[in-house]
Image (tube, grey):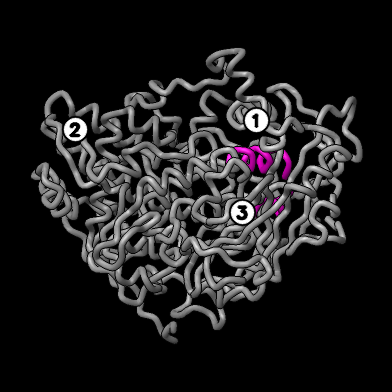
Amino acid sequence: MLPAELPERRRRRPVSPLLKALAIAAVGCAASSMLIAANAVAIPCRNQECDPAVSESDSTLVARQNAQHVLTTGAPGGVQYRLEINDLIKDDAQWSLFVQALAAMQADDQSDVVSSYQIAGIHGAPYVRWDGAGPASAPSGSWPGYCNHGNVLFPSWHRPYVALFEQQLQARAVAISRTYTGDRATHFQAAARALRLPFWDWASDIVPPRQVIADAQVTYTAPDGSRKQIANPLYSYRFHPVDKAFDSPFNTYPITVRHPTGSGANVRTDVDALRSRLSSQQTDVRSKTYATLTRLHTWVTFSNRAGTGSGPPSDAPANSIEAIHDGIHNDVGGSGQMSNPSVAAFDPLFFLHHANVDRVIALWEALNTGVWVIPGSSGGGTWSIPPRTQVDTNTDLTPFRTSQSAYWRSSQVTTTERFGYRYADFRGLDMNDPDAVRQAITRRVNQLYGPNRNARRAFDGDEDENTSFNATALLDPNAPALGPDAPSFPDPAAPTEPSNSTNPAVPGNTNSYDYTVRLQAAQNALNGSYDILVFLGPVPTSPEDYRSSPSYVGSHSIWTSAFMSQYGGNSTSQGFVHLDDALERQGLGGAEPEVVSGFLAENLDWRVVKVTGVEVPVEQVPSLKVLAISTPVRLNGDDELPEYGEPDALPNVTAGKPGGETAGAL
């Protein structure tokens, strides 16, 4: 039960930055010592009226003693690049600062408004007012977290959310860098100013490096130049203490876990299970990401899993960015915190995941210049937005403040540069030339995720100089910042919605067909998160063997919780699984529907499995609807996106099967 009146989060009086920096200098190699010292990292000032005696680049590190609301400004130091986590690990200075800064955030008192715990709690539990933002209590019948899901604000709300976490992380890195001595001082201080939150590109390499998911301790370079170890802050977050009001069983877990084994205080992450699950999803996630970037051109279809918005409906068979996002949550969590929206943000991988979600949004923006938030329903609502009301580009993105009296709005967050970062994919591009940017990003997307990527790499070898990015240059902390006034996409005068309808016929010769399965099911069907798995061929008898089976193709994930299922009514989650790679292995890649339909009718199958691993008979999910779709497509070179014709339903493929659609309406 949610109390009618929830307490506002307590604020802690900031500690002197000097004392904090001195405390950090005393950090030893023992994990416990590190966590004690890490709690003494400088906290940024609550507004921009900092001590004028401090240089501008350092001003955000000085805290006013009077209580001020936290401003979401992004990390200072000009526009810097967010790097892929594998690249960040290669740079010792940035990696060393990153893990120490993250450990510091996690060690902060959980009552501190800018601690890792409090920022994670913005998303969902413990369902309390953060920093005085919004009403004293959530509106009646509204989801009492601040996060927006299942509505048109999903992409724009999460952009300042990740930026807030990033600015707090970087502030601690800057404070830590000041404790480095000798020849290291200048290098580490420059690295700290350039540090941004890394992203995890799950579409290219879905299994994160061992330093993220497997190593209980990681090695870093300490301020005195020695190599030391620290309890890995990416491996898990340790609550101090855990909130007993969390959903069960998370109220008994002292740490965050992924694919947990054991229970209560003895719960642990099953790393092998995590790696196995992620590996099974690589082809599925890559094909979904490519289809999303190349087939969706309206905000209503791209922005959210429910397809809510006032724009025209779309029949393009591709996943929203939120649907892909939901799948990664379930894949990472298993039955751990990441598969539950109420507590997912406490997992340290949450923000690396969301940095990549934001990156895909930025790539999509480059391919669809000027398309942004449109009016739509708020769905189940949030702490500050009543349920089933209209939201739009001018809705406050609570609790992220631009000033002491105003919040960010979607119309103000159309570019990443607003928060002091850019993704490495855009390196060297003139952001004031949208056409050139679109062409470059088209090539980038084709080479990273396109259907010809493997054949092209086998023929050409490494990527050419126009499409590869110099990791060494990106990681150079002495490289000049892009500048606080770096050029960027102009804000659209008003949200626009170009037609998303595909061509009735593909120009020229249609040289292929694309095949997709559309899956729709009620968000609250099973009172928690679950997956709909798709197969082409015999299905194993045991759910434990489903994802390792040669017949397994991919899945659509419903990401929710027992608590969240109480809100939003009977909203439908829509997703797509692309069959082309699986059909290619059967010698049917790109074949005409007359040939493929019979094979699909005989071999296409699906199962429903909870994140706990328990299978649910398909008949017990009456909201489930499954439909096969074919689309003519012409694949072009790297410099052009594929050209798609009109999608056509194949109702005979699924007719007569539990959940199978027979009407064929798209």
Mark in front: 3 vs 1 = 3
Look at the image and tell me in which quarter the C terminus lies: bottom right
Q: Residue at left 50%, top 69%?
A: 561
Of mark 3 and mark 1, the one earlier in the sequence is: 1
- CB atoms of marks 3 and 2 within 8 Å: no
x and y, in percent, of residue 614 in the image: 51, 64
Q: Is 291 one of the magenta-colored residues?
A: yes
Q: Amino acid at mark 3?
A: Leu
194 or 443, which lies in front?
A: 443
Q: Amino acid at mark 2?
A: Thr
Apparent side of residue 633 relative to residue 414 in the rendered image (left or right) = right
Q: Which residue is mark 3?
A: 533
Name the magenta segment's main secondary structure: helix
Query: Quadrant of the rendered structure where residue 211 is?
Result: top left
x and y, in percent, of residue 646 in the image: 86, 43
Q: What distance separates the C-alpha of mark 3 from that of mark 1?
A: 23 Å
- Which contiguous range is marked in magenta? 285-303
x and y, in percent, of residue 570 in the image: 66, 74
Q: Which numbered tag is attached to residue 174? A: none
Q: Callout 3: helix, strand or loop?
A: strand
Q: Is 489 one of the magenta-colored residues?
A: no
Mark in front: 3 vs 2 = 3
Q: What distance separates the C-alpha of mark 2 from that of mark 1?
A: 39 Å
Q: Residue at left 24%, top 49%?
A: 103
Residue 148 visible in image? no
Q: Callout 1: helix, strand or loop?
A: loop
Q: Residue at left 15%, top 48%?
A: 31
Q: Which residue is mark 2?
A: 221
Q: Which numbered tag is attached to residue 450? A: 1
